[in-house]
Image (cartoon, rainbow, N blue to C red):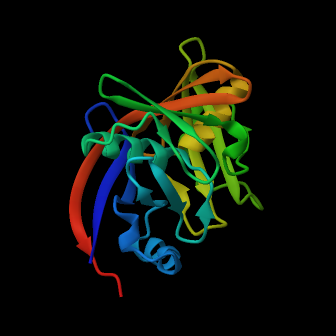
Amino acid sequence: MARLHVLRVFTGEGGERGNPLGVFLDGGEVPAGRRQSVAAELGFSETVFVDDPERAECRIFTPGLELPFAGHPSVGTAWLLGREGHSARVLRPPAGEVEVRRQDELTFIAARAEWSPPWKLIELQTAAEVEALAGPPPGEQLAYLWAWQDEAAGAVRSRCYSLEDGIGEDEATGSAAIMLAVALGRPLQIHQGRGSLLHAAPLGEGRAEVGGRVVLDEIRDFPIE
């Protein structure tokens, strides 16, 4: 058995919604050759295997592939490590060092936009158009669609579709928020999916931070054959 923590990352202010995440804090309990199938079996948009809690070394898998970096897994893992007494200032996924900071009940991570999957950022005219989407535009496998809710306030409405790795619609996408903050060059409050909330801001030189609230839903044993 391996111990699995199930979180929701980028919840609304009241703890609603957010993107589910599986984290194995003792990644060594899951053999490297088994991790992709475990991620597929769990079915979360991402699952994290922490190989060294003290150094915060980790690997991130979607149901279909491994990612060198992803936003909501990084925020969730940073929050969980802090909860468990490993208050790392840096995470170490394969892409490189991801800085961590905490602000009240929010956990932030900072990374380079180029580390994100190659999301296509597609601006729509109104938030209502984003609300009404039934899926991504034809032929788009990695599409992040957004519109201003309140441009003066930096409020954005977005939805994200990741079809190439079996996720479908992603409830909250930190890596795309990093890309959007870099592209727009300003702080953003992003309302994504059915009720998730992300805070993003550019840091200069192709970097941005993204953060939000995290809740722990359950801890359970997961069978490893």
Q: Quadrant of residue 104?
A: top left
Q: Nearer the viewer, residue 142 or 97?
A: 97
Q: Residue at x 58, y 11 (%)?
A: 152
Question: Is the residue 101 above or below the residue 45 in the image?
Answer: above
- Could you tell me if residue 133 is visible in this image? no
- The count of marks equals 0
Front-lying residue, 196 or 179 = 179
As drawn, the residue found furthest toward the top would be: 152
- Is residue 42 among what the camera can see? yes
* Whole-percent x, y for residue 211 in the image: 45, 32
Residue 22, by quadrant, is: bottom left
Residue at (31, 30) in percent of width and height: 13
Q: Which residue appears at 71% of the width and 60% of the height?
A: 141
Query: Toward the viewer: 196 or 194?
Result: 196
Left or right: residue 91 compared with residue 20: right
Q: Is residue 14 left or right of residue 57?
A: left
In this rendering, the answer to whether 51 lies above or below 120 is: below
Q: Is residue 195 above or below residue 162?
A: above
Q: Position of residue 35 (x, y in %)?
A: 48, 74
Nearest the eye: 129 or 42: 42
Q: Position of residue 29 (x, y in %)?
A: 35, 72
Residue drawn 34% across and 82% down? 224
Up the image or down, 97 lies above or below 104; here it is below
Quadrant (top left, top right, bottom left, bottom right) of the C terminus: bottom left
The N terminus lies in quadrant: bottom left
Residue 182 x %, y %: 69, 28
Q: Is residue 39 left or right of residue 70?
A: left
Left or right: residue 111 versus residue 21 is: right
Which residue occupies the extreme bottom position in the image? 225
